[in-house]
Image: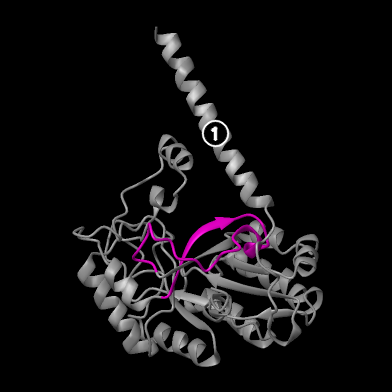
Amino acid sequence: MLVTRRRRLASLLALIALSAIGALTTLCFLPPKYPRIAWPDGKEFAFTIVDDTDKSTIENIKPVYDCLYELGILTTKTIWVLQTNEPNIPEGSSSHGQTLSDRDYRSFILELHNKGFEIASHGARGVSTKRFETEDAIGRFKQIIGHYPHTHINHGSNRENLYWGVSRLDFWPLRILYLLGGGERDYTGHIHGSEYWWGDVALRNIAYVRNLTYEDINTLKINPSMPYHNPRKPYVNWWFSSSNGSDAQAFNRLLSKKNVDRLEREKMLVYCIHPFCKRFCLRRFLEHNHKAFTGRFGFQKWLVCPCKRNSRLSERV
């Protein structure tokens, strides 16, 4: 009897896995259902980066932004407003980093903003934050930057993350696989009545929220409907996806010559998530990617911060 039950469970899991693989295969290979985008000024494709603020300090990211500005690449810098308030988080954790509460860092961020970089939200702070502080942080963001954040990126395991964990997924076989794999589900930023709920604040003030991340360089091919509204997730106005550049290897693999050549042929878009704060990423970026941006990319790309890119795509909706 026990063996039979195990076999049935194994068959069920295999069926779920096959369903998930089939759905993902269909998603990856279906062509876009709309004409290719006409990017501004006759550009062949669009490229942008979001810099997660984890471990970010003036010392470890200023050289990168100096380089980006010199190259004319105006991307997105996410920030935290409040200092981390949990004493037990170890040094070097991704929940540490300078915030707008630091006067020198605040001046640096305002300088980036004045140069044309988008300043976006990575949450109130690097650890879980309850509603009243999240709402206060959004207000301080506007007071300092001059407007509410256009873009928000959920951070790590913060419990106030919007539709995070299993809630990122709508396709039920993937939800089951996620939970069977031990995936977390204790994220309640979108659940009314939770002490971490702030969905109504996000709906009023934030235009775009990042959801899924893919390995493919052509983000728009994988998710041709973005930015999109999901009625099952009503507290987010518009969702968008991204391509994985989470560390030095992923970043350089994503921007390989083969991938960039394909992106140019397909005349689409890469929306890369990459944390510039990590020292090995910083060194590799300066050593290997300066020439890539100025040489291999030539003058055929449209380099733009994500809020403008999302607005451009929204014109199709």
Residue drawn at point x = 53 percent, y = 29 percent = 15
Most extreme residue toward the bottom, as rendered?
Answer: 114
* Main secondary structure of the magenta stretch: loop
Q: Is residue 213 found inside the magenta-colored segment of the image?
A: yes
- Circle 1 packing at 10 Å, graded few (<14), some (14-19), many (20+), is some
> Looking at the image, which is closer to me, 32 or 116?
32
Residue drawn at point x = 55 percent, y = 39 percent = 20
The quadrant where residue 221 appears: bottom right
- Image-based side of 39 in relation to 234, left or right: right
Identify the magenta region.
207-236
Q: Which type of secondary structure does the marked residue at label 1 adopt?
A: helix
The quadrant where residue 303 appears: bottom right
Most extreme residue toward the top, as rendered?
Answer: 1
Which quarter of the image is occupied by the N terminus?
A: top left
Type of amino acid at the residue the image marks with label 1: Ala
Residue 54 percent coordinates (x, y): 45, 66
Residue 228 percent coordinates (x, y): 49, 66
